[in-house]
Amino acid sequence: MTRKQKRLMIIGALALVLGLALALVLVALRDQIVFFYSPTEAIARAVEPGTPIRLGGLVKDGSWTREGETNRFVVTDGETEMAASFVGILPDLFREGQGVVAEGRLTTDGRFEASNVLAKHDENYMPREVVDSLKARGEWQREPAEGGAS
């Protein structure tokens, strides 16, 4: 074998090893690569209680209650609703009818216990997947931005 053939064999072997390693990582993480699950997806995929996930959707109007630092609200994607709770201070822009992505775990009784509620970067933010889901169901109603351009 010439030196050139040996180099090509080594490069080929390294590419094969890297390809196999990447395939193993992607297979192991296939359910965790998703940025978040909607309530419908969380139920359809039968996410095990205690598994850390991100839940995204809209905060249902009239569902948010606060008792001290305990906040209870319902996350909906227009099709399915899931009760959620969070202990702590919510972001200033958290409100009913707005998009939310919360990190946490499902409980054995089907509720979602959030450990973190992600803040929106501006008042018009909503995850693209939530918008697409709402548009597909014909429930998307974009509210006009308050105030004017400055």
Image (tube, rainbow, N blue to C red):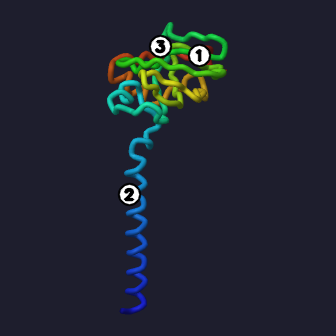
Q: Position of residue 112 (x, y in %)?
A: 48, 24
Query: Mark 3 or mark 1: which comes first in sequence?
Result: 3
What residue is shown with label 1?
Answer: 71
Q: Which residue is mark 2?
A: 23
Q: Earlier in the sequence, mark 1 or mark 2?
A: 2
Q: CA distance from mark 3 to mark 2?
A: 39 Å
From the viewer's perspective, is residue 29 above or below residue 82?
below
In the figure, is residue 138 to the left or right of 37?
A: left
Residue 20 falls in which quadrant of the image?
A: bottom left
Inter-mark Cα distance, 3 to 1: 13 Å
Q: Residues within 10 Å of mark 1 (few under 14, many from 20)?
A: some
Establish if 21 lies above or below 28. below
Residue drawn at x 49%, y 30% is 105
Please tell me how crowded label 3 is: few (under 14), some (14-19), or many (20+) other residues with Cα within 10 Å: many
In the image, farthest residue toward the front = 108
Name the front one of labels 3 and 1: 1
Disc 2 residue type (three-letter)? Ala
Instruction: Say which residue appears at 39% left-offset and 29% top-offset.
Output: 42
Instruction: Tell me: 100 left or right of 66.
Output: left
What amino acid is found at the position of numbered circle 3 in the picture?
Answer: Lys
How dense is the environment of label 2, judged by Cα within 10 Å: few (below 14), some, or many (20 and up)?
Answer: few
Q: Quadrant of the C terminus?
A: top right
Secondary structure beneath dot 1 equals strand
Quadrant (top left, top right, bottom left, bottom right) of the N terminus: bottom left
Can you identify the residue that label 3 sits on?
A: 60
